[in-house]
Image: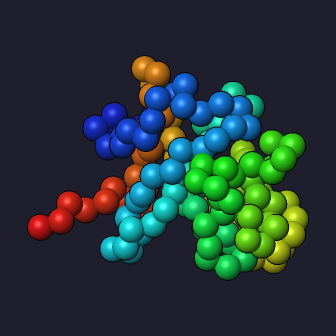
C-alpha cells in the first residue's frame, strides 16, 4: 500500500470512465515538466507518461482522448502505435521494437485517483 503522505491527487474517480476520456496532469522528470495521463480500463485506473515510445510525442488526438475507436488500446494519434491499457506494453504499430509507455503508479481512495511519485517521475516543483 502506498504511503498516503506521498500521494498526489489527480482527479475524482468518477472523472474516469471505462475506455473513455482520460485526465491529463503534469509531473517532473529530470527537472522538466512532463505530460502524463490517467485512464480507466476494466474498472481500474492506470496512468502513464504521455509520450509515445516510438518518438517522444503526446498520444492524445484531442486533450484526454487516448483510446482507439474500440476502446481496447491506447493509441498514439501521430504514429498509430497501439499500447495495452493495463501494462502500457506496445501491441503494434510504430512502437514495435521501442518498448512501451512509462507506467505511473496510481491508487484509488475515498473516491479520488491518486498518483504515487516513484523517483523517476516526481511532483512538479514550485517556482521560487
Q: Horizontal placement of 4 versus 90: left or right?
A: left
Please report the residue visible at 33 percent of the width from the left and 56 percent of the height from the top: 123
Given residues 40 and 78, the one toward you in this image is 78
Please report the residue visible at 37 percent of the width from the left and 73 percent of the height from the top: 32
Looking at the rendered structure, the number of numbered marks drawn on it comes to 0
Please report the residue visible at 43 percent of the width from the left and 20 percent of the height from the top: 110
Q: Horizontal placement of 54 versus 120: left or right?
A: right
* Residue 113 in the image, given as x and y percentages of width and height: 48, 34
Q: Is residue 87 visible?
A: no
Q: Is residue 124 visible?
A: yes
* Residue 23 in the image, given as x and y percentages of width and height: 53, 44
Q: Is residue 35 above or below residue 40?
A: below
Q: Is residue 128 above or below residue 1?
A: below
Please report the residue visible at 20 percent of the width from the left and 60 percent of the height from the top: 126
In the rendered image, which quarter is residue 21 located in?
top right
Given residues 64 and 18, the one toward you in this image is 64
* Residue 86 in the image, given as x and y percentages of width and height: 72, 45
Q: Is residue 65 above or below residue 52?
A: above
Q: Quadrant of the C terminus?
A: bottom left
Look at the image and name its color scheme. Answer: rainbow
* Residue 125 in the image, given as x and y percentages of width and height: 25, 62
Residue at the far top: name it. 110
In the rendered image, which quarter is residue 109 located in?
top left
Residue at the far left: name it. 128
Amino acid at each position: 500500500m502506498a504511503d498516503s503522505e506521498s500521494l498526489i491527487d489527480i482527479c475524482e474517480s468518477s472523472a474516469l470512465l471505462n475506455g473513455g476520456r482520460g485526465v491529463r496532469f503534469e509531473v517532473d522528470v529530470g527537472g522538466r515538466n512532463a505530460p502524463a495521463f490517467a485512464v480507466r480500463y476494466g474498472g481500474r485506473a492506470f496512468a502513464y507518461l504521455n509520450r509515445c515510445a516510438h518518438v517522444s510525442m503526446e498520444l492524445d488526438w484531442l486533450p484526454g482522448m487516448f483510446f482507439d475507436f474500440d476502446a481496447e488500446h491506447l493509441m498514439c494519434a501521430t504514429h498509430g502505435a497501439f499500447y495495452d491499457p493495463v501494462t502500457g506494453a506496445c501491441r503494434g504499430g510504430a512502437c514495435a521494437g521501442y518498448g512501451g509507455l512509462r507506467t505511473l503508479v496510481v491508487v484509488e481512495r475515498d473516491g479520488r485517483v491518486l498518483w504515487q511519485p516513484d523517483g523517476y517521475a516526481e511532483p512538479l516543483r514550485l517556482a521560487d
